[in-house]
Image: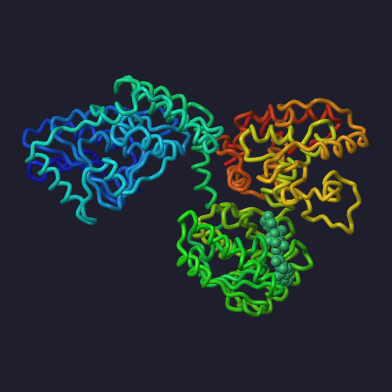
Amino acid sequence: MPAINPVVDLAADGEIAILSVNYPPVNALSHQVRAGLLDGIRTASTDPAIKAIVLICEGKTFIAGADITEFGKPMQPPGLVEVQDAMEAAPVPVIAAIHGTALGGGFEVALCCHYRVAVASAKCGLPEVNLGLLPGAGGTQRLPRIVGVEQALDMVTSGKHVDGKTALAAGLFDELVPEGTLRASAIAFARKVVAEHRPLKRVRDADDKLAAARGKPEMFDAFRKANAKKFRGFLAPEYNIRAVQAAVDHPFDAGLAIERKLFVELMQGTQSAAQRYVFFAERQVWKIPDVPDDTQTIPIKRVGIIGAGTMGGGIAMNFANIGIPITIVEAKQDALDRGLGVVRKNYERSTKSGRLTMADVDQRMALFTGSLELEALADCDLVIEAVFENLAIKQDVFGKLDRIVKQGAILATNTSALDIDQIATAVARPEAVIGLHFFSPANVMRLVEVVRARHTSKPVIATSLALAKKLGKIAALVGVCPGFVGNRILYARSQQANAMLMEGAMPWDIDKAIYDFGLPMGPFAMSDLAGLDIGWSAERTSSSTIREVLCERNRRGQKTAAGFYDYDEQRNARPSPVTEQIIREFAARSGAPQRTISEAEILERCLYAQINEGAKILEEKIAIRPSDIDIVWINGYGWPVYRGGPMFYADTVGLREVVAKLEGYGAKLGKDFAISPLLRQLAADGKRFGDLK
Ligand SMILES: NC(=O)c1ccc[n+]([C@@H]2O[C@H](COP(=O)([O-])OP(=O)(O)OC[C@H]3O[C@@H](n4cnc5c(N)ncnc54)[C@H](O)[C@@H]3O)[C@@H](O)[C@H]2O)c1
């Protein structure tokens, strides 16, 4: 039998045809793969000697999904549906032989085969929801016919991968075969199907699982309600639910048509565009133009951490989780004991959810060595300083480290806003100094801003990025400036939020607008959570800001059950008349005219100020590309991924509109928004941040 094309091959083993795909790296469903599959199925189907067809893939995986580089372009025939129809209608059984990951379109192809065999390590799933889509090639119609409505809803709205054993139990796989024998086992399975005259099992014809759900629309609403928090703001989960509901309510082909219609709507919408953009942004963020992939890295076998406070303990946990030993240095024994106690408690909490066993906890804690002497860090390959946010203290610590820690080690600081170039002046090896800005809680939050200082060497950068990846984090390389990328943009928003308090808005008005836009909380709820007394001192307080007055009245945020808001025992927030009174008094003194501020104005001033700051960050080359800024805001501050990050969002609004609005508010308020020249230029040229690449 002939090779069909360069990526699809057809061979015969006696009466069994073997259709194999070889399109590295993941056998994505490109045009050539689709065309080859269609040809192969047709050729094998019309050969009277062939009694069954095995579909198998070369390389590390079964077809792992659509070729997303083809998204948004006109599709070259044949479409996937045509290929699937040919498989499902084949006159002889078609058997999918699965290894690796059968995902998305790949799994939808497997669902059109009459049987599926897999090695136990194989996984399957429909992760389209993560790109703001739904499985648009019959997945939402065929899946519930096999696993039932509840499991189908769970799979399509979570996008999670199902392991081989679970897939076998659910009927998604018909047989598990030994690792390394897939081809031979699948051929043997095909022979068995032929010998036993097993039927051509077409998933589309199965109805018993759907019959069980018919006339029970309440199960869909119950599912929506149970997941309302997780799905908030996202269109795709709802569309996936509707598509599964269509499988229950309509005959197969009508359901398929509804699935298609819903798919096209999602594909053409901004949410999926944003989610697909983020998918690429997450891959791009690791690429540093002047630090090539083959830059030498420094082996990290032992990590030192200075300060066992909020950040130090959380940062250390990341390393313990991947088996790297940690030496943690504190100023005093009680602080060290307290810090290690918090780490243990955090791990023990994970045993309650079943994520860790007590043995795991002990194993992780055994990786910690505590000390009160910086000398204990002499042999560390990486030291991360997480002491108080004070330049003099940090310089003192770095000066000592310079004399103690071995040459070649990385000396990192977790500072949130201090000038790392200044910290680096304390050492004779500034090339070893870098910022590793973890976010709080550091054992949970995915983002690390890797801060490149003036003299940081390329191996130190490459090692830091590789390490962040190994820790399961996402890292963005940024430059030195007050607040780096994330907090600098946060300050820009806070300025607007605070200004609006003087003009008549209340904290809860502003927070609501930001929450409804899709962020997990607004600026004032966030301040209450972090604590209003960060950087505040009872000795030096002078009642000169709202925040100071709140602290003076012991309203220091959630921890004192009062801050901008009042809190009940369950930490539910309520607007506070005390806060309102304080704000009104400040506003009266400010002389700013009081007015009702619309939600649109709140959003525009907060978000466009962020966008403007982002543009300045790009101008100053503090961030490499707009999408890196978006990665920071999505992963560090909960910017909704379906809006793609502030810079992507700016492009959807239109930069001309952003500039016009900022100018308009500036004129109205008699304020200078100091619009970034880059932003002005792009707007004037009719361009987008996306054009900067
Ligand atoms: N808390 C956050 O949300 C957050 C987020 C990102 C970065 N940061 C930064 O991380 C750093 C630490 O912040 P934190 O919130 O963990 O503070 P923290 O007060 O909770 O912890 C600091 C710890 O450092 C110890 N320490 C102080 N001087 C020391 C010294 N010379 N030697 C050894 N230990 C010493 C203190 O005893 C204390 O336990 C700061 O630079 C801060 O700006 C904080």
Instruction: Please determine whether, in this image, residue 488 is positioned above or below residue 251.
Output: below
Image position of 270 (left or right of 88): right
Image position of 315 (left or right of 527): left
Q: Which residue is at the far front?
A: 569
**Could one spot residue 179 in this view of the protein?**
yes
Q: How many marks?
A: 0
Q: Quadrant of the N terminus?
A: top left
Residue 425 appears in which quarter of the rendering? bottom right
Residue 327 appears in which quarter of the rendering? bottom right
The residue lying toward the viewer, choosing from 170 and 72, is: 170
The residue lying toward the viewer, choosing from 613 and 692, is: 613
Q: Quadrant of ligand 1?
A: bottom right
Residue 264 image point, x, y percent: 43, 25
**Could one spot residue 415 in this view of the protein?**
no
Residue 220 image point, x, y percent: 43, 29
Way the structure is coloured: rainbow
Q: Quadrant of the C terminus?
A: top right
The residue lying toward the viewer, choosing from 350 and 11, is: 350
Please tell me which residue is depicted at 66% across the width and 60% down the height of the picture: 310
Residue 376 image point, x, y percent: 62, 79
Instruction: Please determine whether, in this image, residue 177 is positioned above or below residue 209.
Output: below
Residue 448 image point, x, y percent: 60, 55
The residue lying toward the viewer, choosing from 272 and 460, is: 272
Instruction: Please determine whether, in this image, residue 48 is positioned above or below residue 314.
Output: above
